[in-house]
Amino acid sequence: MFLMWIVPLLLIGLVVYVISGDNLVNALKPFVSASRKCPHCNQAAQNDWKNCPHCGQTL
Ligand SMILES: [Zn+2]
């Protein structure tokens, strides 16, 4: 029976998807929170940068 194989595979796939989804969110959290934009030129800047490397604006 083909369907008898599909059901457990779908369940495993769902579990893997949920777990990997959580890991993906956790992996992206520091990256997302660490990234910000320069208020002057709107270029990407990091939290530990004191000045924008693109326009020199103090961040
Ligand atoms: Zn800038």
Image (cartoon, rainbow, N blue to C red):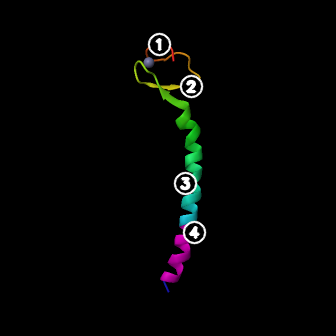
Q: Please, is residue 3 above or below residue 51 in the view?
A: below
Q: Amino acid at mark 4?
A: Ile
Magenta stretch prevailing secondary structure = helix
Marked residue nearer the N-terminal end (3 or 4): 4
Packing grade of label 1 (10 A; few <14, some 14-19, many >=20) is few
When the figure is inspected, residue 5 is found, relative to residue 41, above or below; the finding is below
Of the numbered discs in the image, which one, if any, rests on residue 12? Answer: 4
Mark closer to the chain start, 3 or 2: 3
Circle 4/circle 2 CB separation < 8 Å:
no
Which label number is shown at residue 17?
A: none
Give the labeled residue for mark 3. 21
Name the element at disc 3. helix
Q: CA distance from mark 3 to mark 4?
A: 14 Å
Across and down, in percent, residue 59 comes to 51, 18
Residue 53 place in picture, x, y as percent: 48, 17
Q: Residue at x 59, y 46 (%)?
A: 26
Query: CB atoms at circles 1 and 3 under 8 Å apart?
Result: no
Q: Residues within 10 Å of mark 2 (few under 14, many from 20)?
A: few
Magenta segment range?
3-13
Quadrant in which ligand 1 is drawn = top left
The one of 36 and 4 positioned closer to us in this rendering:
36
Q: Residues within 10 Å of mark 4 (few under 14, many from 20)?
A: few
- Residue picked out by circle 1: 56
- Describe residue 29's horizontal placement relative to residue 53 as left or right: right
* Ligand 1 has an atom within 8 Å of the beta carbon of the residue at disc 1: yes
Q: CA distance from mark 4 to mark 2?
A: 39 Å
Q: Are marks 3 and 2 in contact (CB under 8 Å)?
A: no
